[in-house]
Amino acid sequence: MTITITVAIIAALGSLATGFIVGKTMTKSKAKEIDEAAKKEAELIISKAKTEADSFFEKAKAKSESIKQSKILETKENFIQKKAQFEQETNERNERLREREQQLKDNQKNISRKIEENSRKEKEIELIRTELNEQLELIAIKKEKVDKEHSEFVKKLEQISNLSAADAKEQLIETLKKEAETDAMSHIKQIMDDAKAKANKEAKKIVIQTIQRTAAEHAIENTVSVFNLESDDQKGQIIGREGRNIRAIEAATGCEIVVDDTPEAIVISGYDPIRREIARLSLQKLTADGRIHPARIEEVVQKTTKQLNDHLMEIGERTVIDMGISGMHPELVRYVGRMRFRSSYGQNLLQHSRETANLCATMAAELGLNVKLAKRAGLLHDIGKVPDEESELSHALLGMKLCEKYGEHPAVCNAVGAHHDEIEMRYAISPIIQACDAISGARPGARREIMESYLERIKELETLAMEYEGVEKAYAIQAGRELRVIVESGKVDDKRSEELSFEISKKIEDEMTYPGQVKVTVIREMRSVSVAR
């Protein structure tokens, strides 16, 4: 409304100004007319503006009243709602307060009851304490009396026995010590028997399961190979003029060729089985071709050597594939193939390694260890027996060096090096490899010992047992797997015989190397003979 009036006033002032300016330029008469007309127009505009302003004011007043009423209603509704909510919260709070008050009352009652109980118990404890003090006083009096009587009794005993208390105490201690030793030996024997029973049960279970799941044919390798001929006429061709052919074969292969009276056969002698195989295959090709002379012999031996090396690689690859082993260095694979032509105590090395690997895998699975590492270590444990070059190291340490050189796992390297106790066992699979190697070698019929070493071991067993006092005779039986010890009944009692069997078995474990186990049996016999005449 104010804006409208202002606009009207400004318009009137503008008209007056316009009239004033026009009046200056016109004549006075015309200026007067124009001035009157301008005044009328200004009044008209002002009147119209007042009318519009009054109308706008009325409308604004009505609208404002409507908004006011709406706001009042909304405020009342909010107030009623807030009031209801406040009353509800107040009621809930009051209810919680009443519940809390009731809990406090209950707690107060409980506390009061507990206080009463504690007071009663304190009275009872005080009463018990008083009684205990009285009893302690009585006990002290009685103890003093007993000590006095004990002193008098000890003096009387010393007078009767002619022994002082210290001497009697010493004799008593000595007697108790002997009884304790006897009881301890009995307990030790019982504990060891129980442990052996349980250990043997579990060990037999695992070993039997392992052996039952492993079946293999074992080839017997010797230091000689026999090459069969179609006829004895071929012997002359092989010998050649003045023996040139046979010397060329021996020079090229490094083996000795023995041509004797054996019909249709030639003996190839040599400690290296691979060289014997090269000689055998070369002779086979030469006899089939018929062209036998030094130049041809050299050529055939070279080709055969290359073919055999390829064959060794093929054997190694087939072996690791059959065993489920992957990621092995090609040189180690070739060494695995070379084991096919190596034997140990008459047992084929490759078959022994495969058997050991299978045993290790089975035993590792039974014990919850890494089966793949155990099988890998079992296959490679004797890899040091087939190197290309001779070494001063033992086969176990050499095998460990080869495994380390070609990137095998540290557990595998340690198991290979420690399977003969030459280094410390640092992984759980190491004793498994050692045990399975012994199982494979100790199986009846697996190996053939040299007679000299066998007799030496038997003699060493008997000599070891004879070193103990009271031993009359000692006999190694069951191919050195059992030792019977006969003792003198007058010098060795039953208790000492048990101790003696244990001591001998421990000494055998510490000082001797043997496959499998050695059972020690101590025999004590008392005979009383009289003749009736």
Image (tube, rainbow, N blue to C red):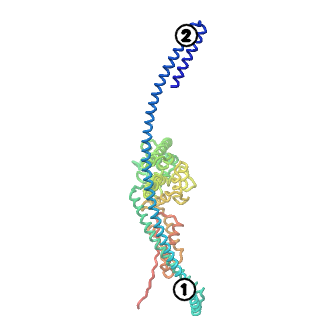
Viewer-side residue, 387 vs 419: 419
Viewer-side residue, 85 vs 324: 85
Residue 252 seen in the current view: yes
Comes first in the chain, label 2 or label 1: 2
Residue for point 56% across, 16% down: 14
In this figure, which residue is indicated by the disc labeled 1?
Answer: 138
Q: Dot 2: what SS?
A: helix
Which three-letter amino acid code belongs to the residue tagged 1?
A: Leu
Q: Position of residue 146 (x, y in %)?
A: 56, 88
Residue for point 46% across, 27% down: 58
Q: Position of residue 356 (x, y in %)?
A: 45, 56
Q: Dot 1: what SS?
A: helix
Residue 72 in the image: above or below residue 333: above
Q: Mark 2 and mark 1: span between their CA atoms? A: 146 Å
Residue for point 52% across, 14% down: 40
Q: Quadrant of the C terminus?
A: bottom left
Q: Which numbered circle lies on residue 34?
A: 2
Q: Residues within 10 Å of mark 1 (few under 14, many from 20)?
A: few
